Image: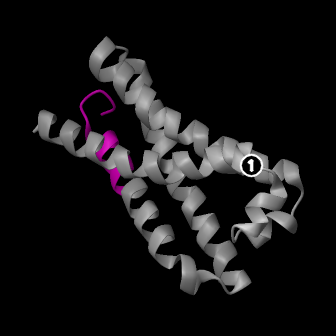
């Protein structure tokens, strides 16, 4: 059962890395004007440092769901396992806040698929990582 949870966990990491990792890197490195022109109009309405902070949190969350389980499973650092759980939970919370923001702005009809799917991946990953023996 342990190996099955590990495989499921790593399979859930892939869409999160591709979705949130790419989005975070894009928001961190692109000019605000380019982000707004690409459809992220909200980036012009909040301070630039908040856009960069959101991007940094996404990147740190993605790093956490990769590095913490890897440190636990491949290097044997059992203390790192909880950090993977916390990173996955943080990404799920990020998607809840993103969904609320899009609902308030009237954009949820355009973003609901990505918001809900990334939330689901992060929420399930949180449960899977928490169920692994290193954390329990």
5 versus 43 height, above or below: above
Which is more toward the observer, 85 or 47?
47
71 versus 5 height, above or below: above
Q: Is residue 15 visible?
A: yes
Which is more toward the observer, 58 or 79?
58
Quarter of the image that includes the C terminus: top left
Residue at the (43%, 40%) spot, across then down: 85
> Which picture quadrant has residue 104?
bottom right
Residue 58, percent across and down?
Answer: 60, 46
Relative horizontal placement of residue 44, taking residue 98 as reference (left or right) = right
Residue 126 included in the magenta stretch of the image: yes
Q: Secondary structure at mark 1?
A: loop
Relative horizontal placement of residue 25, taking residue 89 as reference (left or right) = right
Q: Is residue 90 visible?
A: no
Residue 102, percent across and down?
Answer: 65, 77
Which is more toward the observer, 112 or 91?
112
Residue 34, percent across and down?
Answer: 77, 59
Q: Residues within 10 Å of mark 1 (few under 14, many from 20)?
A: few
What is the chief secondary structure element of the magenta stretch? helix
The colour mode here is one colour
Q: Which residues are magenta?
A: 124-136
Residue at the (45%, 75%) spot, across then down: 113
Query: Which residue is denoted by mark 1 in the rendering?
Result: 30
């Amino acid at each position: 059962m342990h190996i099955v949870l590990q495989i499921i966990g790593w399979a859930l990491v892939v869409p999160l890395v591709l979705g949130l990792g790419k989005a975070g890197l894009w928001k961190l490195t692109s000019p605000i004007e380019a982000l707004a022109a690409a459809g992220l109009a909200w980036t012009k309405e909040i301070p630039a440092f908040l856009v960069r902070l959101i991007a940094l949190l996404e990147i740190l969350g993605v790093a956490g769901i990769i590095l913490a389980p890897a440190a636990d499973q491949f290097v044997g650092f059992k203390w790192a396992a909880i950090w993977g759980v916390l990173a996955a939970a943080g990404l799920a919370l990020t998607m809840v806040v993103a969904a609320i923001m899009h609902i308030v702005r009237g954009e949820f009809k355009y973003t609901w698929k990505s918001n809900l799917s990334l939330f689901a991946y992060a929420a399930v990953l949180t449960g899977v990582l928490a169920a692994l023996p290193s954390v329990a």
